[in-house]
Amino acid sequence: MATITEQLAEWSTALSWEAAPQRVRDLCVSQVLAHLGALFGGARHPMGRRVIAGFGRPLSDDAARSAYVIAALTMALDYDDTVFAGHVSHSSVGVPLAYARSAGLDGAGLLRSILAATEVAARVTAAATLGPFRGQTAAHTHLAGAVAGRCVAQRLGASTMVDAMGIAFAQPPWPLNHAFFGSDAKLLTASTPIRTGLDAVDAARAGLRGAPGILEHPEGFLARFATIPLAEAAGGLGERWHTDTLSIKVHPGCAYIDGAIDAALRLHGAVAAGFDQISAVSVDASIFTVGMEQRAAPYLSGPSSGLAALNFSTGYSVATALLRGGLEVEDFAPPRVEDERVWRVARLVEVRHDAALSRRALLATAPIGAALRMAGDAAAGWLAAGAGITEDEARALLAAPDPGFEAAEKAIGARVRVAMRDGSEHAAEVDIAEGAAGPDTRARHREISRTKLVGNAAPLVGEAAAADIADRVERLPGAGTDEVRALLDRLANALT
């Protein structure tokens, strides 16, 4: 019987762009638009400028170094987009972009590489998602994304990909929370495993062999990285499309606080004029939001807080949204980050667990609902602990595994209440944040992703040039090799 990596390699290296359903191809283009928005956002921030100064510009002639830089820039502000399961785009979009020129890819070839890498990386991540690492800390995602993205882009063949996967996963990353939240090392969370994956491809091309059963072997990856291994999550190739679960970040920062930010934005008009009269702010939220706040809070120190802690701070983001009616790249750098008015309100924000919101978030397709249903009774304890219910109640809520992801949702909602000194109160509630997987995003993903790209590129290149870049990305399905190179040139010049 073929191993997991053999199945993934055979499918991804044989995949044709036209074989994917039209809705999936459309989402893939939006994924590229949105990821480029994160790239421009990172390049605009002082931290991104340090990355470029230290490692060089993105989309240089050195493809491996370029992939490393792209990942660091898109990681910088936690502005990257997600699927079930994982923050795959750092590798699944960034690596094919970095190798597109040397591989001589046309538009369909570039998109094919991105789609294949996304589907492979998402499946490997899903197989281990019921374990100690999820979200950006699941850095092993990018071992798979880098290997698949490069192998498909360069048409290296299934056997090379199997060996490369076996070599890449021989020493998977184990991130430490203290460094993740308490330093700038988080910027390299995807970059480092991407480089490992690319080196593994070089090793495989040179004839080194990898263990083909590295993922599912009793002494392999899943045995060490998953509390409940879900080898079956790697299946459904060509039938269950993880790209269907695309969630697009419309704000810099952790997706787990997007619902609270959106609720705060709805209250901006009512409270901004009297912002200095706010006396209390409460955020009722799911275990995902509460957990992120608990992890980030010890690393917050007002205006001198590190960028990673700021991106995960519900208090800072909600206070900023209430005052300014938006949350932008500039809000995470001086002089805005030094605004004591914002910090006064940020310190008032109380994040409280709401069991009903947790049940909704835990059972939605992403970030782990699909995995819980796949695990069945074995996952009842996970759901019970997070939702504040008994294991019997949890078992009753766990339906059959999802046959497909066309109706996927990521419902990490929140309820925000703002009390004023005059005794008045304002409240708003959000179920699914803007851009998160759900009916609205399925209907508007192109608009949302294009707005993200143009809005983040325009401060660097101007509105017209930013719109031109977006137009070129949208034309990728029919673009020739010369048009892809022209797009890459535009991007490289804009990001210099």
Image (spheres, rainbow, N blue to C red):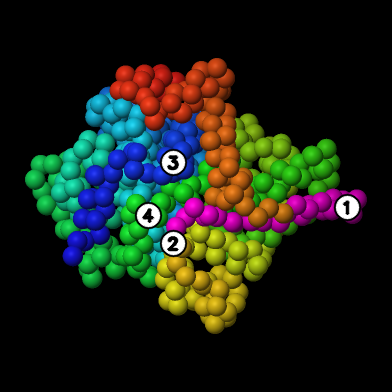
Q: Amino acid at mark 3?
A: Gln
What stretch of residues is rendered in magenta? 403-428
Q: Residue at x 35, y 58 (%)?
A: 236
Q: Which numbered disc flags the more N-terminal residue, 1 or 3?
A: 3
**Residue at the location (37% across, 44% down)?**
20
Closest to the observer: 474 or 73? 474
| 190 or 413: nearer the viewer | 413
Q: Which numbered disc flags the more N-terminal residue, 1 or 4? A: 4
Tag 3 residue: 22
**In what element is the residue under mark 2?**
loop
Task: State which quadrant residue 22 falls in.
Answer: top left
Q: Which residue is mark 2?
A: 403
**Is residue 276 shown to the viewer in this render?**
no
Q: CA distance from mark 1 to mark 3?
A: 50 Å
Q: Circle 4 sits on which residue?
A: 239
Q: Earlier in the sequence, mark 4 or mark 3?
A: 3
Three-letter code, disc 2: Pro
Q: Residue extending furthest bottom?
A: 392
Q: Which residue is mark 1?
A: 424
Q: x, y (%) of residue 216? A: 25, 65
In the displayed structure image, the side of residue 131 where residue 387 appears, left or right: right
| Marks 3 and 2, the one that precedes in the sequence | 3
- Using residue 42 as the reference point, say whether residue 160 is left or right of it: left
Percent from the top left, x then y, of residue 243? 43, 47
**Residue 76 has which mark?**
none
Question: In the image shown, does 3 or 301 lie closer to the viewer?
Answer: 3
For the residues labelled 4 and 2, say whether their Cβ atoms are less than 8 Å apart: no
Who is closer to the viewer here, 375 or 462? Answer: 375
Amino acid on which disc 4 is placed: Glu
Residue 53, how many percent across, how many down?
Answer: 39, 27
